[in-house]
Image: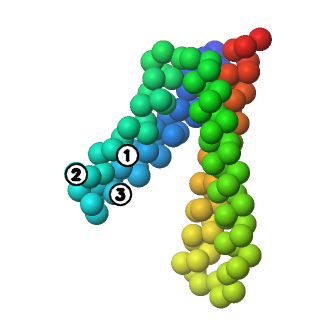
Amino acid sequence: MKFLSTYSKFIPYLYFIAIIAYWFTIVNRNVGISAFPILLFGIPFVWQIVKPSRKLNFTLGITFVCLSSYLILAYISDMLNIINLSTTTKQFIVYGGLFVVANFVMALWMIRNSIQRAF
């Protein structure tokens, strides 16, 4: 249990690194070498694992809460405008919803970690 509580603060960073790596592999298959700038998005998350900074952590958390809030609004808007629900559309709604909720939860987790370190 101590192991889990010690390393649980790294879960949001590892989540976002995994999403960036997945995004890179998908774009790299289709576009090629011009997909490498996507890897630059992972630098702040790797930096937080190597050398944690409370300000960077809070900034990343707030940024991703704002982006996730926008994604939630876009997801709800898209869901309400769909008239004909095919199986592909239903899969997209489920996977997209899980992705949006996971991003929001991980961003809140990063903010919680930065607040806990402050006190």
Separation (CA) of disc 2 from disc 1? 11 Å
Q: In the rendering, at what x and y percent does residue 89 appear?
A: 58, 77
Q: In the image, which disc is placed on residue 38?
A: 1
At x 64%, y 84%, the residue is 85
Q: Identify the residue position indicated by label 2 in the image.
A: 33
In the picture, measured across the screen, residue 91 lies left or right of residue 43, that is: right
The earlier-in-sequence mark between 1 and 3 is: 3
- Amino acid residing under circle 1: Ile
Pointer 1: residues within 10 angstroms few (<14), some, or many (20+)?
some
- Amino acid residing under circle 3: Ile
At x 29%, y 45%, the residue is 36
Toward the bottom, the furthest residue is 84
Q: Nearer the viewer, mark 2 or mark 3?
A: 2
Q: In the rendering, at what x and y percent does residue 55 appear?
A: 62, 20
The earlier-in-sequence mark between 2 and 3 is: 3
Toward the left, the furthest residue is 33
